[in-house]
Amino acid sequence: MKVVYFTHSLASCWNHGNAHFLRGVLDELRERGHRVAAYEPEGAWSLANLLGDHGEAGLEPWQRLYPDLSSTTYATDADLAALVDGADLVIVHEWNEHQLVAAIGKLRKDGAPFRLLFHDTHHRAVSAPAEMQAYDLTGYDGVLAFGETLSEVYRGWGWDGRVWTWHEAADTRRFHPPAEEQDRQGLVWIGNWGDGERTAELEQFLFAPARTASLPLDIYGVRYPEEAKATLARYGVRYHGWAPNALAPEIFARHLATVHVPRRFYTTVLPGIPTIRVFEALACGIPLVSAPWQDSEHLFRPGEDYLVATNEIAMTRHLAALASDPALRANLVANGLETIRARHTCAHRVDELLAIAATLGIEAGAERIQA
């Protein structure tokens, strides 16, 4: 079948976590013989920031490691009907402009033969509900939500029976343990500072425990204001700026452990949704310790796949134990890899997507479907 995906950006992962998962899913679809097309708008802010900071060299890792994937840039006056011509399934991500979301929905309402899904991978349904409800989804066949609690929100908005929980996952073609182990030192955290959604939590569950446990800490990410950088300096953290997501496995391979510090919305009003970094870290075979997070969907085995710290003292104790106990590290790595490989790869998510497509009347091998 032919799958068309409208994303904010496929080329840039600068503060754009959806690119991680999308690359893996589209590549898996392509490997299975499906036709894929990705479209991103001209002037996408993620790509503009990446190029502004790093130039064309910033695109090299993703181009090298995903040589068979590409995206097409479209203008605001693009002929959308031409872009989706021949598609069996069209998916539109929620970071797109309201006008685009509505225009593609209108094509479907006017009789376009593809099936149409809206893909929500953010907390705005609860943090900015009016903004999300302003999207015109009347032409859409359904919603893909990246967690069950988010699916529940959409059910409350009238999408019962037409919303599917579709979690993110690891692209295990590229996110896997290193072929040869090297010397590992200290902790690493890959994440963006953001909008103050976890500032206190980062101090409590990352900066302070790392310092107390006498473990060097390397941080990669963007949107760190001067006051954030000052905080890092106060704790002796080594800040490296942006890192291409495609190079995250190499970064993980140099460190003893990493930490998961969820944003506040994913511990309160949308519990049960991990960030993609959890999937990616476990897939890369690096021990993980998590700040408090409720795995309400039983995606993992807390305490076996990763350690859980309920407070700063517990986090410090876990980090010190990992630094001194190779057997503990090896056990966590083995368990985490087992869970990822059994349940949480992009191949699993493609299986789920094809099953959803089948419920919408799409045969996986079909070139076209009937309206």
Image (cartoon, rainbow, N blue to C red):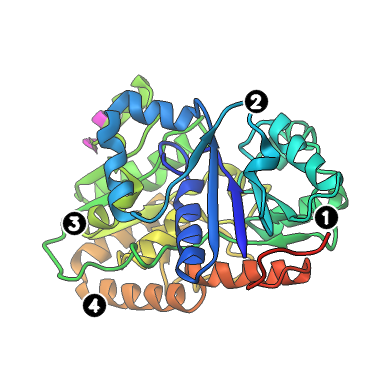
- Secondary structure of the residue carrying numbered label 1: helix
At label 3, the amino acid type is Arg
The image position of residue 304, as x and y in percent, is 42, 75
Name the quadrant of the N terminus.
bottom right
Give the distance between the C-alpha atoms of the residues marked 2 and 1, in whole angstroms.
33 Å
Give the distance between the C-alpha atoms of the residues marked 2 and 4, in whole angstroms.
59 Å
Against 331, residue 155 (above or below) is above
Q: Which residues make up the magenta segment? A: 233-238
N-term-proximal mark, 3 vs 2: 2
Residue appearing at x 65%, y 51% in the figure: 91
Residue appearing at x 40%, y 66% in the figure: 307
Residue appearing at x 62%, y 70% in the figure: 352
At label 1, the amino acid type is Arg
Return the residue nearer the eye: 299 or 228.
299
Q: Is residue 291 left or right of residue 155?
A: left
N-term-proximal mark, 3 vs 1: 1
Tell me which corner region of the image, top left, top right, bottom left or bottom right, holds residue 53.
Answer: top left
Return the residue nearer the eye: 285 or 24.
24
Q: Which residue is mark 3?
A: 254
For residue 123, say whether it is visible.
no
Crowding around mark 4 (Cα neighbors within 10 Å: few <14, some 14 to 19, many 20+) is few
At label 4, the amino acid type is Ala
Find residue 155 and name its label: 1
Number of the front mark, 3 or 2: 2
Q: Which residue is mark 2?
A: 77
Against 48, residue 371 (above or below) is below
N-term-proximal mark, 1 vs 4: 1
The image position of residue 218, as x and y in percent, is 24, 44
Give the distance between the C-alpha atoms of the residues marked 1 and 4, in whole angstroms.
45 Å
